[in-house]
Image (spheres, grey):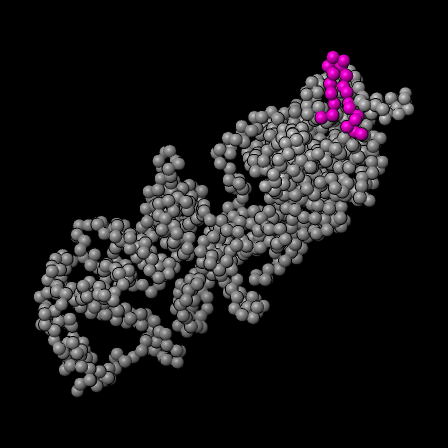
Amino acid sequence: MAGEDSGNPVPSTPESPTSAGFNTEQLPHDSSHSSDEEEAAVDPEAIRDEPDEVDEEEDDGEDLYNDNFMDDYREMGAQDQYESVGLDESVEDERDLDQIMQDRRAAELELDARDARIPNRKLPQLLHDQDTDDDNYRPSKRQRADLRPPSAPRSYDDTDGLQSSPGRSQQDHSRDDVPMTDRTDDYPYEDEGDDQGEFEMYRVQGTLREWVTRDEVRRFIFKKFRDFILTYVNPKNGHGDIEYVRLINEVVSANKCSLEIDYKQFISVYPNIAIWLADAPQSVLVVMEDVAQRVVFDLHPNYKNIHQKIYIRITNLPIYDHIRDIRQIHLNTMVRIGGVVTRRSGVFPQLQQVKYDCSKCGSILGPFFQNSYSEVKGPFTVNIEQTVYRNYQKLTLQESPGTVPAGRLPRYKEVILLNDLIDCARPGEEIEVTGIYTNNFDMSLNTKNGFPVFATVVEANYVAKKQDLFSAYKLTQEDKEDIEKLARDPQIGERIIKSIAPSIYGHEDKKTAIALAMFGGQETNVEGKHRLRGDINVLLLGDPGTAKSQFLKYVEKTGQRAVYTTGKGASAVGLTAAVHKDPVTREWTLEGGALVLADKGICLIDEFDKMNDQDRVSIHEAMEQQSISISKAGIVTSLQARCSVIAAANPIGGRYDSSKTFSQNVELTDPIVSRFDILCVVKDIVDPVTDEMLAKFVVDSHFRSQPKGANIDDKAFSESQEESQAPAGLADSKILSQELLRKYLTYAKLNIFPRFHEKDMAKLTKVYADLRKESSRGQGVPIAVRHIESMIRMSEAHARMHLRQHVTEEDVDMAIRVLLESFISTQKFGVQKALRKSFRQYITFKKDYHGLLLVLLRELVNDAMRFEEILSGSTQMLNYVDVKVVDLQAKAEEYEITNLEAFFSSSEFKACYELDEQRKVIRRHLADDR
């Protein structure tokens, strides 16, 4: 006790009492000589909670201040020397590094041997007192390992090889005086204690990020994730194959190094670990990648010669975050964001594992990994041969144009691509990124703000392109069945055209052109050398107040990846691409403009005539070749701009003059006009009948759209509205909802690829020859070879609208009609009538005969009124006007319309006219007009 030499501590012996005052017979024998069976055979009843005899000297503690206490401070030359590791350079040590490490290992072995001779004093009865928190009490791993039967097998030997956290001991023996978290020799969850062990693992102590770095938690994740890979069977797969064993075989067959894990499948089996993965992804992914690497190399041993590392890619993360909604709470968690790539840097080598050469002794130090906090002091030089690099690339991801709130600037976020994710996206493509939202130190932000600010980035784990997904709107099997059923309707084409901007009255030809542009034709590659565009460009030119901008806004909300801009608000670089210097890498990078952002979508340009000529010339290449060539700041490249262009412009002087040619009405050159497939001239013509129907449509639209709560008790007023609302209600039953039209459009563009037949080319050739002859006589838009391609594209778009894989004669006739309407509308008023008469067999195809017959009937009524005015001198006394049915039939036959029964029973005819079947006359009442 007090008289013993404290400088040489003597271990406890059977003759000496323990510090707790127990009899030696009640304690287990020396653990260095006893077996696990003897320790397990100790009778727990023999250990009493309170000792019978307690030595008073033991209670008072050991007397350190005695006669020989100075012996503790005597000089011991061999043990009073400090190791040079960690000391300043001024402290010299003659030993080399190998000798120092050998001495250190010998000292650790001696300490472990001393600890092994100390009897086990960890008694649950003493530790579990009143001050001990129940949540912090955990059973000893050593005790559970000793109580295990000797014949019990281990779960999996590879768990012993799992990399431990930095600083953990890798010895094969255990120490009884350290907590369970420091032991790596045995797997703690076996047999009868497995359920209790899993329960303890799920009880997170401290922060989650610290919890998942503990060795026993890492081994727990290792085991569970290995079981998931080797045993999970997808319930949707009727074959009963193991899902991820099949995926591993596909990865090896494709020579890839990434294994995709479906998060929804993983969370259905192990929800807690899946939540850990989302909240602490950096630590959990390391374990999961270690599991994947071991399993892949076990199944395919030679694959390690091709790829030394297997990466885990997390797909189907359920929570989708907008870029502008990411905050500090998302730091170091897994997020899923989407947007358009606006900028992409080059590929750089980034240090992943570095080794240094010591300039003094020449030895190699390391490896040191990124984000390592090891303290080293030089001078050192990088070992070029043994240093490991990895690929590094940075993207700028900007919010998709359709998701930015009105009046707000689009937000952007930097995305870091590593390893095999390099070059997975290019500027202009719309992607979804699943990754870790983290931060890094940015000196420029500190200088700018004057206080420490960290730049935030997203380290990509999985990148998916929008076109790689089934659709942007996640079509279900029910949606597919509804769409295919809808396509069997013979009137589906007319219903889709009516569904384009249904709140706008009339303008059937403009709606048809926009519908064809939204569906688009089929892109053609001529033997992989020359590419012909399949997108349709449309120009809306007309008077103010004719709903041109409203058409563009509707397309922006309905079409996929639509980008809206204006002529005055867009410049040449804003439409094509700009060159910027990256503040981090100091290199020149490209940033795409509106046409690049609208790749595989629609670019909408309002006020097209207000653009500068230089800016308008910059989009010539984008409208025909659908690419943008850049040769600036040493960058020579080409960006994709595969999009339809729908532009709206106003004529010179504000209104379109039909007595002038098209080129005299608009300040657009022939090269830019010829790149538009369809030209729609919108005129505001004064017509009492049309104006009255338009006014009724607008009033009814406002009446139906007024807020709820308006009480209409007047029955007479309600009955008076029935007649005016009947046509609108009839039309509403055929109109597709905007959501259904969007799904129909998505399905058609992803699954329908129409092909052209040679027999339809003869008709196109004949029409082109006739148009060339007429265009040489008139002064309208010149007809070029591009217009043949335009008719082919419109035929394919009309076939895609009906979900047909082959172009039919009906599709060709519709394309010819649309092109003729476009060509004739650009001519002078006097030339239009002659052209309509020449091409009437094509113009009347599938046209709304009711509207045409109403115009013809109105002309006959006007002729009858003029004849009566010549006879009687005035029409004031007339109450009605009669027109013979035979005269209307003669007019209709000029347009190849033979059946008038449907017109006589239509609501448009009954609203203003009466049919006397006995007399075969049509009566128009004039009292209502007065």
Vertical side of 25 occupied by 630: above or below: above
Q: Residue furthest top?
A: 918
Q: Is residue 919 magenta?
A: yes
The answer to whether residue 879 is left or right of residue 402 is right
Give residue 79's position: percent from left, percent from top.
Answer: 26, 78
Residue 10 at least partly seen: yes
Location of residue 834 with respect to 703 vertically, above or below? above
Residue drawn at point x = 81 percent, y = 23 percent: 879
Residue in front for this viewpoint, 307 or 533: 533
Position of 484 with respect to 80 (left or right) is right
Instruction: Give the x, y percent position of residue 869.
Output: 88, 24
Q: Position of residue 796 (x, y in %)?
A: 63, 31
Quadrant (top left, top right, bottom left, bottom right) of the C terminus: top right
Tell me where the magenta segment starts and ends, as one range.
911-930
Q: Residue at x 67, y 30 (%)?
A: 720
Image check: 55 left or right of 560? left
- Left or right of 115, for residue 427: right
Q: State whether residue 391 appears in this view.
A: no
Q: Which residue corresponds to the image point at 10% horizontal and 62% vertical from the top-left?
A: 46
Question: In the rendered view, would you say 292 is above or below 930?
Answer: below
**Quadrant of the rendered image containing residue 284:** bottom left
Quadrant for the N terminus in the image: bottom left
Q: Is residue 797 magenta?
A: no
- Residue 888 at what x, y percent from top left? 77, 19
